[in-house]
């Protein structure tokens, strides 16, 4: 008869062996959490010795997650079954816990150090005590222990030295949130990786394993919130029929430190409350929202709050009743405040009836409201003033609202950067925006310092990323799309990390530790976003994508319901020149920036060339920094973008055999698609703009393969994510 201990040992062996199996794993499902056996013998020996026994004291859902993650990860990485215990018996011990839950952590005397890491931070320290050597994961909270666990595992996966640990780490931003633009019918707006993860029909009874793996992945990079529903909201999600389903997801995510948020449709009191108005100053409306919020908290005691898109692109809002954005946000904030909830009020607003440059409208509407929002309201601002373009100058609102917490909104899904088929590593784009100097409190007043609260002493801080996740087996469609999810989480936790270091981590955890492979793939990644900018929108061109679906070139788009939904509105090409004049002689959008920024950008000679046509309408013979005339420079930039993609193809093809065949082939095919897309962009845009410039494409450059009429006739159908 087999005893209980023998059965448990067999189960541990099964878990260990299953982590060594790669046949099912190389489809990308495991993301960066690939806990395969480390191949370096010296590193393996060091880790096996230092992590000889694993001790986790205390019992809770989060500590259970810690135990399970350590058991699975260490079993795979170290190549031996790992059993987690609650007592230290061996000489070398890995211990994880808080002083409150673990007597062993308490005995190591870390209380003073723990004071500096806050609620979510952690310590990783090496200690000797009582004749034992400890590797300690210590934190003030259980979720901090979880974050510390994932940090240690990241160090192991990237083969870092853990013999003398002295790591003190805590997040720079409080609310680190994914925004899912998921609809209740499981379609995803601007989603290019399949359908929505949330299977509302099967909830609440059926909790898909994918929900738990989603939570694990987010916790591993420090994301602590998820907005489940589209900003173009549906009131139904606030009804009991759906709240019980939301509760099921909240319960599944809670052990991983992830709070659930919902989008609130402003007209819900009318649509599901049967009121005649949604006026935020109406007492019945206030009472309705208060009752609804109380109801939500009976289902989800730690509900995070609401994300709201109002009075933009046809969405209802307080302006329908001649009220301000602050009136609407404050009404919801008052309902949430007693429960500890927050309101994230989006600043992406523009009105076609306002004869003003669209780039100016958010600032115009929100700047006068600074200081009028409740303390639990954050205004969520896109990185740029137009709409997630391949490159934009930082939004002028950053630094302009010192009395109102501003929350960054990045787009991880590549709506305007080739969507799910193009390799575009976005960390450099995120970093570019975060490094932008607002001069709000003098030189060095970076956007990063605005959103982390250090510049204006914000009481609430936040950062959001519009998710690129779907039901595709590998989560993000393009294997390298995973890197953008990963990079967002890492920068949300610590915006000081470099794009290069994040790429280095991700490559090693996702593909290989081979130095040549890492170096070449990192070079591909670091140049990929610039390549996309060059073959789509060089020198500050913007919003010239295909109509509505935004896939492929469409610089000729005009005569649509809104002027600012056309390409000609933005590039303004004529026989005299090209570009949008946003200086004093044009829309004067530059006036919304600090004087120091204006002084640099208002002069074409000192304006960074990446923003040249964003702020200036210039003649075709304008001399650029290369010495070439503007038309020729555009031709070289577009052609250079294509050349960059071809270089990526060559690099990747040379790596065959250094990565599993399934993912190698997948990336190879997608790079072939990207090269085709890049040529299409180059040829279509140059032929179109040539109708204005009347100048030849330089003789030494590759010429378009077809006519302009051919490119203008292309109209892809059923593009996903519309």
Image (tube, rainbow, N blue to C red):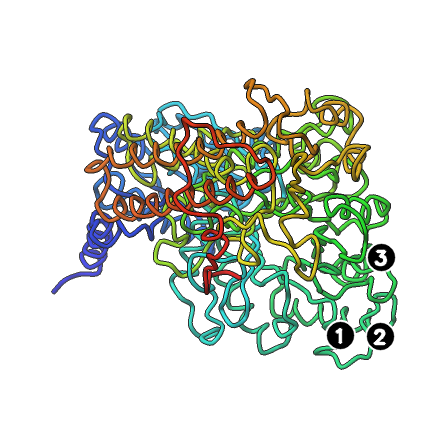
- CA neighbours of label 1 inside 10 A, class few (<14), some (14 to 19), many (20+): many
Residue beneath disc 2: 284
Name the residue nearer the viewer: 675 or 417: 675
Marks 1 and 3, how far apart in space?
18 Å
Closer mark to the observer between disc 2 and disc 3: 3
Q: Earlier in the sequence, mark 1 or mark 2?
A: 1
x and y percent of residue 285 in the render? 82, 72
Residue 269's disc is 1
Task: Note whether 522 is above or below 361 in the view shown.
Answer: above
Q: Looking at the rendering, in which quadrant would you find the N terminus? A: bottom left
* Residue sitting at x 73%, y 36%: 581
User: Does the image show residue 492?
Assistant: no
* Residue sitting at x 54%, y 63%: 182
x and y percent of residue 76 in the render? 26, 44
Marks 1 and 2, how far apart in space?
9 Å
386 relative to 439 in the view: left or right = left
133 relative to 281 in the view: left or right = left
Q: Are marks 1 and 2 in contact (CB under 8 Å)?
A: yes
Q: Earlier in the sequence, mark 2 or mark 3?
A: 2
Residue beneath disc 3: 324
Residue 96's quadrant in the figure?
A: top left
- CA neighbours of label 3 inside 10 A, class few (<14), some (14 to 19), many (20+): some
Closer mark to the observer between disc 1 and disc 2: 1
428 relative to 118 in the view: left or right = left
Q: Earlier in the sequence, mark 1 or mark 3?
A: 1
Name the residue nearer the viewer: 159 or 231: 231
x and y percent of residue 321 in the render? 86, 66
Residue 174's disc is none
Task: Note whether 299 is above or below 158 in the view shown.
Answer: below
Task: Note whether 147 is above or below 228 in the view shown.
Answer: above
Closer mark to the observer between disc 1 and disc 3: 3
x and y percent of residue 145 in the render? 48, 43
């Amino acid at each position: 008869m087999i005893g209980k201990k023998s059965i448990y040992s067999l189960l541990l062996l099964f878990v260990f062996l299953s982590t060594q199996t790669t046949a099912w794993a190389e489809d990308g499902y495991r993301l960066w959490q690939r806990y395969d056996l480390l191949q370096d013998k010296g590193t393996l020996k060091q880790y096996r010795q230092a992590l000889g026994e694993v001790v986790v004291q205390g019992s809770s859902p989060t500590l259970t997650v810690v135990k399970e993650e350590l058991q699975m990860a260490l079993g795979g990485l170290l190549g031996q079954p790992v059993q987690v215990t609650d007592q230290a018996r061996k000489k070398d011990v890995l211990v994880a816990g808080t002083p409150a839950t673990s007597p062993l952590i308490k005995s190591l005397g870390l209380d003073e150090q723990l004071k500096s890491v806050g609620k979510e931070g952690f310590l990783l320290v090496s200690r000797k005590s009582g004749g034992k050597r400890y590797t300690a994961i210590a934190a003030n909270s259980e979720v901090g222990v979880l974050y510390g666990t994932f940090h240690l595992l990241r160090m192991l996966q990237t083969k870092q030295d853990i013999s003398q640990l002295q790591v003190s780490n805590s997040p720079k931003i409080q609310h680190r949130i994914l925004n899912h633009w998921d609809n209740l019918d499981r379609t995803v707006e601007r989603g290019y990786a399949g359908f929505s993860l949330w299977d509302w029909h099967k909830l609440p009874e059926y909790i898909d394993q994918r929900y738990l793996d989603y939570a694990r992945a987010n916790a591993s990079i420090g994301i602590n919130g998820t907005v489940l529903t589209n900003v173009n909201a549906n009131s139904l999600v606030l009804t009991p029929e759906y709240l019980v389903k939301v509760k099921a997801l909240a319960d599944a995510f809670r052990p991983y430190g992830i709070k659930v948020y919902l989008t609130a449709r402003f007209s819900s009191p009318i649509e599901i409350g049967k009121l005649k108005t949604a006026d935020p100053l109406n007492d019945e409306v206030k009472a309705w929202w208060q009752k609804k919020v109380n109801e939500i908290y009976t289902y989800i005691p730690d509900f995070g709050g609401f994300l709201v898109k109002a009075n933009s692109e046809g969405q209802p809002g307080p302006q329908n009743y001649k009220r301000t954005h602050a009136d609407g946000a404050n009404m919801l904030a008052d309902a949430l405040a007693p429960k500890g909830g927050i309101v994230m009020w989006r600043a992406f607003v523009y009105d076609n009836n306002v004869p003003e440059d669209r780039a100016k409208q958010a600032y115009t509407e929100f700047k006068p409201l600074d200081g009028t929002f409740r303390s639990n309201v954050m205004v969520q601002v896109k990185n740029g003033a137009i709409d997630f373009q391949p490159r934009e100058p930082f939004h002028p609102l950053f630094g302009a609202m010192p009395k109102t917490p501003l929350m960054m909104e990045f787009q991880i899904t590549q709506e305007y950067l080739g969507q799910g088929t193009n390799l575009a590593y976005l960390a450099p784009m995120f970093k570019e925006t975060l490094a932008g100097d607002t001069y709000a409190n003098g030189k060095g007043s970076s956007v990063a310092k605005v959103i982390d609260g250090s510049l204006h002493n914000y009481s609430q801080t936040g950062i959001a990323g519009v998710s690129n996740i779907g039901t595709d087996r590998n989560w993000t469609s393009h294997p390298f799309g995973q890197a953008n999810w990963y990079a967002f989480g890492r920068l949300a936790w610590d915006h000081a990390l470099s794009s290069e270091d994040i790429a280095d981590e991700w490559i090693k955890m996702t593909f290989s530790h081979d130095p040549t492979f890492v170096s070449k793939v990192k070079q591909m990644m670091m140049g990929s976003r610039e390549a996309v900018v060059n073959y789509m929108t060089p020198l500050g061109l913007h919003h010239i994508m295909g109509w509505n679906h935004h896939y492929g070139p469409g610089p000729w788009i005009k005569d649509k319901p809104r002027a600012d939904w056309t390409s000609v509105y933005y590039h303004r090409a004529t026989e005299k020149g090209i570009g949008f004049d946003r200086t004093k002689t044009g829309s004067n959008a530059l006036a919304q920036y600090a004087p120091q920024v204006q002084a640099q950008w208002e002069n074409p000679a000192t304006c960074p060339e990446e923003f040249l046509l964003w702020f200036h309408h210039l003649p075709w013979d304008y001399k650029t920094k290369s010495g070439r005339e503007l038309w020729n420079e555009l031709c070289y930039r577009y052609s250079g973008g294509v050349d960059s993609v071809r270089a990526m193809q060559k690099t990747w093809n040379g790596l065959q055999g250094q990565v599993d065949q399934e993912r190698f082939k997948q990336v190879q095919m997608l790079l072939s698609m990207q090269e085709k897309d890049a040529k299409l962009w180059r040829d279509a845009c140059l032929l179109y703009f040539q109708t204005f410039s009347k100048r030849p494409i330089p003789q030494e450059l590759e010429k378009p393969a077809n006519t302009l009429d051919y490119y203008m006739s292309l109209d892809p159908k059923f593009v996903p994510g519309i």
